[in-house]
Amino acid sequence: MSLSRLHACGLGVILAGPALAQTPVTFRGETITIQIGYGPGGGYDTYGRTLARHYGRFIPGNPAVIPKNMPGAGSLRVANHVYNLTARDGIEIAIFAASTAMEPIMGNDQAKFDVTRFGWIGSMNQDVSFCGVWQSPGVPTSITEVLKKDSNELIFGSSGPAAISHQHPLVLKNILGANIRVIAGYDGQKEVNLAMQRGEVHGACGLFVSSIKAQWLPDIQAGRLKLFLQMGPKTTQELGPVVDVFDFAKTAEDKQVLELHFKQTILGRPLAASPNLPKERLAVLRQAFLHTLWVPACAGTNDCGTAVHLIPSGSSIAYRPIAALALSITRCG
């Protein structure tokens, strides 16, 4: 897999097709389904349903746009489903984790897709990810504490191995030596939150700033949930001082591994259609996606009828992390 192929196949495409007024493509009378890779109530669900409320107004023919939840395997299920649709099937768009896009590149044989061939549409935001711990007696509350040899075990909940809620704590365990265990099988972050409150797990990773603002802020402000680590291609002090995972890399090799896993978070929540969707239709959906997110009532605000912060991505810059990682892994493999 070469970097040039990644760009040629659409992963690094600049999302700018022909102007809507110049294309004869119409979706009149059709239904477009946005398949959300996680269960109801989480960040992916919030963003997917927000898009569904507005998207159809900007697509020629004003088709109905219906959001549905298809949780499973950390959103790997929905990625496999949408990728393998044929041109004869109805139009479905998947919203899934950036980490899921990396699964075939990382050697997961359950990922039944070629990441270079997806009909990439864009991403609704770029974000920084956090790990948080529910405050309970005897539970470690800092990364420094959990790195100690005599630390109590810290248990995290996740939706499945392809999710960053699963991968991020395992990186902390396997690279930094943190005393961590992960329990998988929850539908999404909402279910993990309930599991924390029940005492089944101690914490969660993969908490995006946007999701924290929409769902977790009362728990943080009340002292029930403590953010103890942030990771990503950038840092933020928006939620107070929280240490950065890269500060704990002991060697240059450790840092490279951390970058491999954590820099992909800049993709936020990517959306993609099947590679079998005709290119002229895909181009229209890409353009309509950007128009939807840049309408004055939505762009850069916490509006659109829900608590989301939209930072739409419509250029190759958003996909360079996956392209670079794919090329690096190919060369090393």
Image: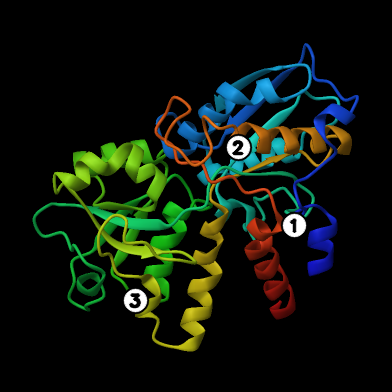
Q: Helix, strand or loop at disc 2?
A: loop
State yes or no: discs 1 and 3 in contact (Cβ < 8 Å).
no
Q: Is residue 14 left or right of residue 170?
A: right
Q: Which residue is mark 1?
A: 12
Identify the residue at the far front of this view.
Answer: 296
Q: Which-is-in-front pick, marks 1 and 2?
A: 2
Count of numbered tags: 3
Image coordinates of residue 298 in percent, x first then y, are: 52, 33
Image coordinates of residue 197 in percent, x first then y, are: 20, 40
Q: Is residue 286 visible?
A: yes
Considering the image in quadrants, where does the N terminus appear? bottom right
Q: Which residue is mark 2?
A: 294
Distance, label 3 to label 2, CA atoms, is: 43 Å
> Considering depth in this image, is 308 or 112 the residue closer to the camera?
308
Image coordinates of residue 229 in percent, x first then y, are: 31, 64
Q: Earlier in the sequence, mark 3 or mark 2?
A: 3
Q: Is residue 187 visible?
A: no
> Considering depth in this image, is 10 or 234 the residue closer to the camera?
234
Q: Earlier in the sequence, mark 1 or mark 3?
A: 1
Q: Helix, strand or loop at disc 3?
A: loop
Distance, label 1 to label 2, CA atoms, is: 21 Å
Image coordinates of residue 113 in percent, x first then y, are: 73, 49
Q: Is residue 47 above or below residue 331?
A: above
The crowd level at tag 1 (other Cα within 10 Å; few <14, some 14-19, many 20+) is many
The amino acid pointed to by label 2 is: Trp
The crowd level at tag 3 (other Cα within 10 Å; few <14, some 14-19, many 20+) is some
The amino acid pointed to by label 1 is: Gly
Q: What label does residue 177 carry, if any?
A: 3
Residue at screen point 70% across, 29% down = 92
